[in-house]
Amino acid sequence: MQNKIIEILRAKNKPLDTIELTTLLKIDNLEDNKQMLKILVELENQNIIAVNSNHKFYYLNPKIYLQGVISINKKGFGFVKINNSQEEYYVHQKDLNNALDGDQVIFVLKSKSPNNGKKVEARIVKIIKRNLEYIMGVVKKNKNNKKYLEVLNNKLQQYKAEILNLKAAQENTVVKAAIIKANSNSNTMQVKILEVIGNVNQPGVDILTILHEFNIKIKFDNETLQEANHIAPSVSLHDPLLFTTRKDLRDELLVTIDGNDSKDFDDAICVTKNQDGTYRLLVAIADVAHYVTANSFLDKEAFARGCSVYLIDRVVPMLPERLSNGICSLNPHEIRLVMCCEMIIDKKGEVISSSIYEGVMESKARLTYENVNKLFKGEPTTIAPEISNMLYQARRLYKVLLAKKNHDGVVDFDLDEPKFITNKEGKIIDIVNRPRDEAEKLIEQFMIRANETVAETVFWMDLPFIYRVHDQPKEKKLRELYTQLSLMGLNIKGKLENIHSKDIQQVLDKLRDQENFKVISALFLRSMEKAKYSAVNDGHFGLASKCYTHFTSPIRRYPDLIVHRLLKEYLINNKINAKIIEENREFTLLASEQSSTCEVKAMECEREVDQMKEAEYMEDKVGMTFPGIISGVTAFGIFVQLENTIEGLVHISDLRDDFYIFDEKTLTLIGERKKQRLTLGKRVKIKVKKASKQLRQIDFTLIN
C-alpha cells in the first residue's frame, strides 16, 4: 500500500485528500482505511509526502522540493542553503511558513533565475526539525498591565511572545520558555515558561542567559561528579607500576607558560640544544586519557560537551574542576602524568626524529606570557636564571620554526582580538586589543609542531585517527574577494585554482602597509573555509601543514583526548587488530562530526557574550566620539570598527547629508547629490548614538 500511495501521488502530481486516495486505492473496508491513514502519517514523518492547509497530501519530488537550513535576519527575511552546498536562496518573510532561524526545512524555488541581479527566491514548504527547543526572554508588563515575554534570542527579537502559563511569570525575571506556536507573518508566538533563571539585574544572569540560549550545559550530573570524586587528587610515587611504561621526566626543566588568568594548564615545554647544533623540543601534555576512560560517565559527558567554553569572566569546563584544575592540570611543583612528544629539530626547522611516550613530570614553574615577554625584552623578572637560560634556547628554536613556517607559507591574518578588563565585581572597565607578543607566538609554534609530528606519525601507520583539517578556499569566493579588492583600488592578481597558502600570504604581505590592512585581512579571512575535525587527512591550508591534528589541549577539547587514547592503543599498548581498527574508524567519524558541531556552538556563544558585554560597556558612552574604520557596507547602512575592535552600525536613516544608494557589486553606499562614497576601509569619525546590552547592539552616527 505504501508504494501504491507514493506512485499515485507522484503520477497525479497534485494534492489529494483521503477520500480521493481511498477511491484510487480501491479501499472498501475499515481496516485498510486505518492502514492507509497510518502509512500517510509515516510517509509525512519521513518527508516523502507533505500535507497542505486544505489537508491534502502531495509527493515531495526531491528534484523540486529541496532540503536545507534557513538563516533568518533580524529584519524578518531569510536565506535558505541546500545541505552541504554554498548556494543560498532569498526567502521573503511571507514565504517563511513559520520557520525560525536555524530550522531544517523543505523548500521550493519560486523561479529558476535571479531577478534583476538579486538572489533566486525560495518558499518554505515544511519544517523538518526545529533548531530551537526553547527561547530566552524577560517577563515584562505592557500598558494594559498584561505580562508578556520580551525575547532575548538575537535573531528572534522582532517576535512578540504571549505567555500561556502566566502564574509562572514574575516581572523582570529571565526565563527559559518552550515555543508552542509561531507565526512568521505577524512575528508573534505563544510560549510556555519552563524555568526561571533569575532577576534581569542580578550579576551573572546575563551570561547565564546566553549559555541557556545556546543550550550549553552548565552543571555536571551526579554520576559524572561521583566518578570524578573517586579519582585520587595526587599521583602516588609509591605505585610500583608507575614507571613500567612511563619515562621519568621529573629532572627535566619543564615549565608551563599561560595567560595571567589561566587555571588549567594542559602543556609544558623544555628546550635544550645538542652538541651537533640541533634542538631537542619536549612538549609534555596532561594525560587526561589516563583518568577519562572510554565509555565512562566522564567520557560521555566530555563527548556531549565537545570542548570548554571560555567566556569573559568564567569558563564552562568540558571536565569537572577536580580534573580540569586539579589532577590533570600541570600545576607547579606537583607530580603529574603526561603524554609526551619529543622532537629533534635541525637548524632548518625540520623534525629529523621524534618519539611519543607516556611520562611522569613535575613543572618547575608556572610562567605567564607577560613575565616571559619581559625577559625577552630585557626587563627585570622573577624567573630563575636556570629557567631563563632554557627560555633563551626556546626563543632561538621558536625563530627557527617561525622561519620554516613562513617559508612554507603559513597564513597570518594579524587580526586584533578584544581583551576585556574587569574589576573585582566583574564589571568591564576597559576593552583593549589582546597582546600577542613573542611568548604567545613561541608556545603557538611549539604546539603546532607537536600537533604536526603526532599527526604524521599515525598517518604513515595508516590507522583511524582524528585530524584537524582546513580546506583551500573556493575559487568563487576568491574571485569575489579579488573583485572587491580591485574596486577598493587594489589591483591584485592572485591565483584562483590550485592555490597554496603561500599565495595568500604573499598577497597579504604586499598589502600589509595599507592603512586599511585590518579590513583587507578580515575580507581574506571571510573568504577562507572553516577549519573542522575529520577522520580523513585533507591537510591544513592556513597552517601550511600537510598533516595536522589537535594533541595539546585534552583538558578542554574532546578530539585531543581521543588522539591521546588512540596513541596509547597504537604506540604504547600495541592494540591493533581488525576489530579495533573498524571500531576506531566508526568512532573517529562520529567524534569528528560531534566535536566540530560543539566547537561552532561554543564559538557562537562566546561571540554573543562578547557582543553583549561590548554593548554594556558602550551604554555610558552615548554622545562620545571615536575614530573608526568602515568594516562592512550593506543596503541598510555601514558598520564601523573602533580601534579596540568594538563594532557598531550607522543606519542608512542616520546618513542625513544625502540620499544614499547601495551598489551591491562594489559594496559601496553612494550619495546621489554629493557623490560621497562610503566604502570598506575608509577612515571615519563617529558619535555613539545608543547602545543596548539587551539587544546586544551598538548604533553610531557619522560626524561630518
Image (cartoon, rainbow, N blue to C red):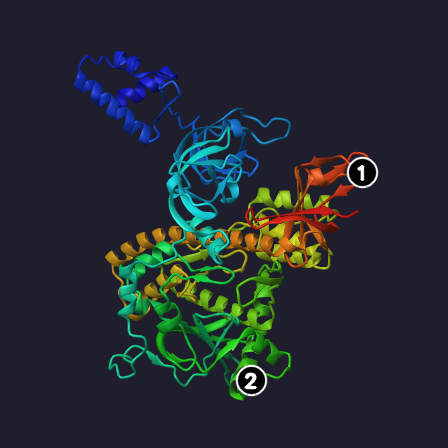
Q: How many other residues sit within 10 Å of disc 1, few (<14), some (14-19) or many (≥20)? A: few
Q: Quadrant of the N terminus?
A: top left
Q: Are marks 2 and 1 in contact (CB under 8 Å)?
A: no
Outermost residue toward the front? 145
**Residue, disc 1:** 675
Instruction: State whether residue 25 is above or below residue 248.
Output: above
605 on left or right of 704? left
Which percent across, then down, holds residue 65? 43, 27
> Hey, which quadrant is residue 341 in on the image?
bottom left
Disc ID at residue 382: 2
Which percent across, then down, holds residue 653? 70, 37
Which percent across, then down, holds residue 403? 60, 69
> Could you say which is closer to the camera, residue 262 or residue 86?
262
Q: How many other residues sit within 10 Å of disc 2, few (<14), some (14-19) or many (≥20)? A: few
Query: Is any part of residue 599 visible from this angle?
Result: yes
Instruction: State whether residue 524 is above or below residue 66.
Output: below
Residue drawn at the location 58% of the way across and 31% of the way down: 119
> Could you say which is closer to the camera, residue 596 or residue 327?
327
Which percent across, then down, holds residue 20? 30, 13
Q: Give, as a three-letter code, the residue at label 2.
A: Thr
Q: Give, as a three-letter code, the residue at label 1.
A: Lys
